[in-house]
Image (cartoon, helix red, strand yellow):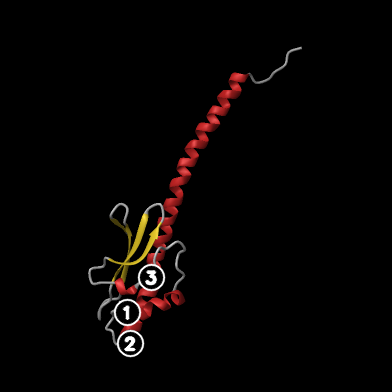
Amino acid sequence: MRRSAFTIIELIFVIFLLGVLSAVAIVKMGGMSDRAQQVQLKAFVGTLNRTSGAGFWFRSMEDGHDGNISNSTYNATIDQYIELIAGYDNGPSFENCNAIGNGVFLTYPFTVNYEVHCKNGSRSESPRFRLYDATNSQYID
């Protein structure tokens, strides 16, 4: 009577292939979490530009600051307007907003260090926020 079964060589070959496939999958999955963090931060910056920045700009106009939001009193109320993404290194600081647009509003030290930069508002323009990749020294738009 003849039995059909796998030989030890075939078994080792299958285990080797599974190891290679899992190593490739792990490498691919690792890059996905970095990309997911970047996408989440881009969405956060978009929300800041569309809603919160305009709201604080309007408030500064009412308070007589001519659109200037670099005031420490606004820092305490940001969480009333928007939910901050967990993992930031420093609290939000409108005081760092400047006319150039490279003031650091928030810092996120993930695998890649991200900063949310803030350009201060003026009488005719609301403040703008941009995502900056501090590790690679480039803006992500």
Circle 1 sits on which residue? 71
Question: Circle 2 sits in a helix, a strand or a loop, which is it?
Answer: loop
Above or below, 99 relative to 24: below
Quick one: 121 or 106, which is closer to the camera?
106
For badge 2, the amino acid type reads: Asp
Mark 1–mark 2 distance (CA, rounded to whole Å): 11 Å
- Residue 134: x, y in percent? 31, 56
Check residue 34 in the rendering and tell me which mark sits there, or answer none: none
User: Would residue 23 be found to the left or right of residue 109 on screen?
Assistant: right
On the image, which quarter does residue 75 sit in? Answer: bottom left
Instruction: Give the alpha-carbon distance from disc 2 to disc 3, as whole Å.
Output: 20 Å
Indicate the position of residue 47 as horizontal and vertical percent values: 40, 68
- Could you tell me residue 35's position as x and y percent? 42, 52
Residue holding disc 3:
92
Per the image, the residue denoted by label 2 is 63
Q: Quadrant of residue 77?
A: bottom left
Sequence-wise, the earlier of marks 2 and 3 is: 2
42 up-or-down from 6: above or below? below
Quarter holding the C terminus is bottom left
- Dot 1 surroundings within 10 Å: few (below 14), some, or many (20 or more)? some
